[in-house]
Image (spheres, rainbow, N blue to C red):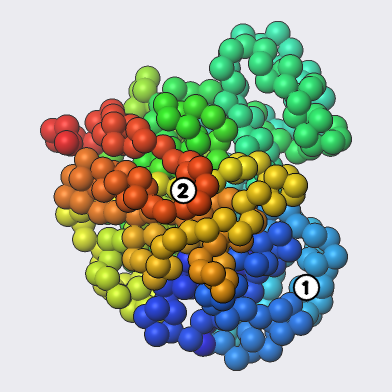
């Protein structure tokens, strides 16, 4: 049996796909706001049953770190696993380490990799040791300290919260003084206090590029690359939502090879931690000198590029991919994979009274469709519907032998998707993906 331990249900789409292939799967969702996700689609276990389920499982998969949660619930899950520590920023990592020490096969997290992601300063230090360049960066413990730093600055800056706080608080400044004002007013109102650890990075113009490695506990078995649009609206407008559109491929190239070699340098640290799973290094390829600047680590499941990669595997072979510890089958490197996140209002805003409008919205589709990886859904007597956790219905993935073929297929699938509400997705994926790819110093002719 495979047990998926999730914070907000982001990896349950993978668990559901494995169930369709005949794997015995159970799921636990930690965050109370998301606990109805996949009701009627996956067998769920309660917190009181979790320790027993973990002992029974052959493999335990963790799909997301805990950015923020309910202190009482965090304390209880640590007690259930008899982990002797206070519920600080790390909860799932220490539990994963304990299960590994007991001889359990664990995929997806560790204390070390949680620190790598959540502590941005530490993550940057590790990246520098591996040979990555980093943007000019400063850390601040409070909003007022950051505001004092920004006084009279004429350069542009990017705000990134520490500890994976709400993603839409990440903000790229458009004109000097903008962040200084926002730190005093709307961000202060949103956070509710002055104490708020954050990072300010000097803005670099360029193209964001991610390289992801799959680690089997001893070595990397596979690498893939991602061009991602984080903004909700066409043209890069609207709030940053973590991941809205993706383009993924696995074929090596002159640009990606140096990034891949640096990522491979992390293997001894991952090996010592006992980590098994995907780890993504996000970089910015600068327009000015075409160097790769490190931005952040994502060592876990729970982001849309993974579903893109899985769409490049032979259909029905996902269980084999996990069973072989990511060695086989290998993705088709002749193809591109594209994805588009589909949401409904009030996403990306999660106010409880607004989310009531999303709960119960009809989704008139077969949940077993292979081109959609569902997220905020449940199965009711009337059929598939939105569970009302955040309004992210799911991720559509398609493949093609060109960027245009893959992205246009996603566009068509999004248009045809039958949801009883206003669908939200980008319609400029094809031109954005081609433009970004052709701007990179990869070599070779432009891609159609």
- Estimate the x, y position of residue 394 in percent, counting from the top left: 47, 55
Q: For mark 2, does the 10 Å Cα neighbourhood hold few (<14), some (14 to 19), or many (20 or more) residues?
A: many
Where does label 2 land, which residue? 342
Q: Which residue is mark 1?
A: 78
Q: CA distance from mark 1 to mark 2?
A: 34 Å
148 displayed left or right of 14: right
**Is 218 placed left or right of 102 in the picture?**
left
Compared to 424, does 32 lie above or below?
below
Whether residue 303 is visible to the viewer of this picture, yes or no, is: no
Give the answer, above or below, for where 153 lies relative to 215: above
Q: Nearer the viewer, residue 358 or 280?
A: 358
Residue reaching furthest to the left: 445
For this rendering, which residue is in front, 109 or 312? 312
**How packed is label 1: few (under 14 Cα within 10 Å), some, or many (20 or more)?**
some
Q: Residue 115 sits in which quadrant?
A: bottom right
Who's the residue at 48% across and 73% down the image?
A: 15
Image quarter for residue 433?
A: top left
Which quadrant: the C terminus?
top left
Residue 98 shows in the view: yes
């Amino acid at each position: 049996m495979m047990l998926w331990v999730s914070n907000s249900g982001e990896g349950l789409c993978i668990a559901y796909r494995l169930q369709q292939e005949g794997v015995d799967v159970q799921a636990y969702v930690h965050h109370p706001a998301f606990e109805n996700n996949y009701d009627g689609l996956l067998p769920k276990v309660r917190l009181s049953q979790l320790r027993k389920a973990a002992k029974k499982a052959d493999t335990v998969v963790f799909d997301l770190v805990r950015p923020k949660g309910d202190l009482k619930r965090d304390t209880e899950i640590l007690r259930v696993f008899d982990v002797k520590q206070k519920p600080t920023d790390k909860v799932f990592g220490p539990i994963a380490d304990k299960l590994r020490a007991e001889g359990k096969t664990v995929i997806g997290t560790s204390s070390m990799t949680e620190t790598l992601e959540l502590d941005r300063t530490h993550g940057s230090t590790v990246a520098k040791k591996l040979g990555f360049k980093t943007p000019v960066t400063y850390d601040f413990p409070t909003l007022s300290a950051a505001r004092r730093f920004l006084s009279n600055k004429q350069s542009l800056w990017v705000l990134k919260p520490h500890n994976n706080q709400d993603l839409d608080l990440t903000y790229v400044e458009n004109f000097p003084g903008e962040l200084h004002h926002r730190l005093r007013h709307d961000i202060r109102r949103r956070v509710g206090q002055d104490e708020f650890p954050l990072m300010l990075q000097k803005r670099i113009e360029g193209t964001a590029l991610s390289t992801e490695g799959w680690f089997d506990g001893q070595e990397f078995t596979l690498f893939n690359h991602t061009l991602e649009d984080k903004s909700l609206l066409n043209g890069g407008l609207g709030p940053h939502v973590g991941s809205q559109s993706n383009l993924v491929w696995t074929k090596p190239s002159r640009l990606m090879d140096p990034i891949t070699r640096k990522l491979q340098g992390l293997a001894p640290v991952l090996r010592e931690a006992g980590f098994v799973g995907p780890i993504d290094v996000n970089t910015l390829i600068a327009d000015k000198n075409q160097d790769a600047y490190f931005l952040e680590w994502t060592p876990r499941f729970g982001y849309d590029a993974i579903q893109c990669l899985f769409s490049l595997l032979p259909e029905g072979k996902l269980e084999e991919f996990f069973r072989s510890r990511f060695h086989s089958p290998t993705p088709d490197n002749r193809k591109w994979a594209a994805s588009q996140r589909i949401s409904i209002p009030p996403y990306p805003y999660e106010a409880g009274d607004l989310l009531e409008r999303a709960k119960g919205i009809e989704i008139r589709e077969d949940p077993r469709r292979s081109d959609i990886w569902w997220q905020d859904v449940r199965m009711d007597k009337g059929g598939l519907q939105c569970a009302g956790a955040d309004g992210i219905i799911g991720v559509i993935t398609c493949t093609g032998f060109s960027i245009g073929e893959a992205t246009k297929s996603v566009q068509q699938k999004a248009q045809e998707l039958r949801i009883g509400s206003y669908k939200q997705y980008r319609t400029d994926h094809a031109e954005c993906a081609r433009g970004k790819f052709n701007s990179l110093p990869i070599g070779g002719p432009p891609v159609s």
